[in-house]
Image: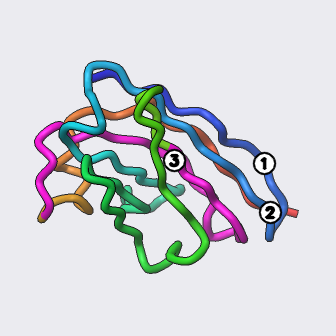
Amino acid sequence: VQLQASGGGLVQPGGSLRLSCAASGLTFSRSGNMGWFRQSSGKEREFVAAIRYNGYTFYADSVKGRFTISRENAKNTVFLQMNSLNPEDTAVYYCAADPRGILSTVRLPDQYGSWGQGTQVTVSS
């Protein structure tokens, strides 16, 4: 599985960004979990959102109601729509894939075997 993340940038507080993650080697609609994680300076990588092959979605409490994860099966692409961004959302965002699609581990970064290169999101005025 190869993943290519894009869409990061600099945005003012309250603004929006949409991240994309294009995948090859995995068919989303048939199997697997796709997740977004983030890591800011001096902190561990943390779970942001995930979507399973059957469309079920999961969110960290810190982003629930502001972020939306979705997918476009025809393009094998997963998106993360981020609204109402605040400075605490500043981080490098990574997409990840777990072809096994295990429900109980969907929030655990060490269960994802494939990672994209990361895209920087900076929220600042």
Determine if the magenta segment contains residue 86.
yes
Q: Toward which corner of the image does residue 82 lie, by quadrant?
A: bottom right
Which residue is at 52% across, 32% downward?
A: 5
Q: CA distance from mark 1 to mark 3?
A: 13 Å
Rendering coords of residue 61 (x, y %):
44, 80
Q: Are marks 2 and 1 in contact (CB under 8 Å)?
A: no
Q: Toward which corner of the image does residue 1 lie, by quadrant?
A: top left
Reading the image, the residue beneath label 2 is: 15
Which residue is at 48% across, 35% downward?
A: 21
Q: Nearer the viewer, mark 2 or mark 3?
A: 2
Q: Toward which corner of the image does residue 24 lie, by quadrant?
A: top left
Q: Which amino acid does the dot numbered 3 rest on?
A: Tyr
Label 2: which secondary element: loop
Reading the image, the residue beneath label 1 is: 10
Q: Which residues are magenta?
A: 79-103
Mark toward the start of the polypeptide (2 vs 3): 2
Mark 3 neighbour density, 10 Å: few (under 14) some (14–19) many (20 or more) = many
Rendering coords of residue 115 (x, y %):
34, 34
Reading the image, the residue beneath label 3 is: 93
Which residue is at 73% across, 43% downward?
A: 9
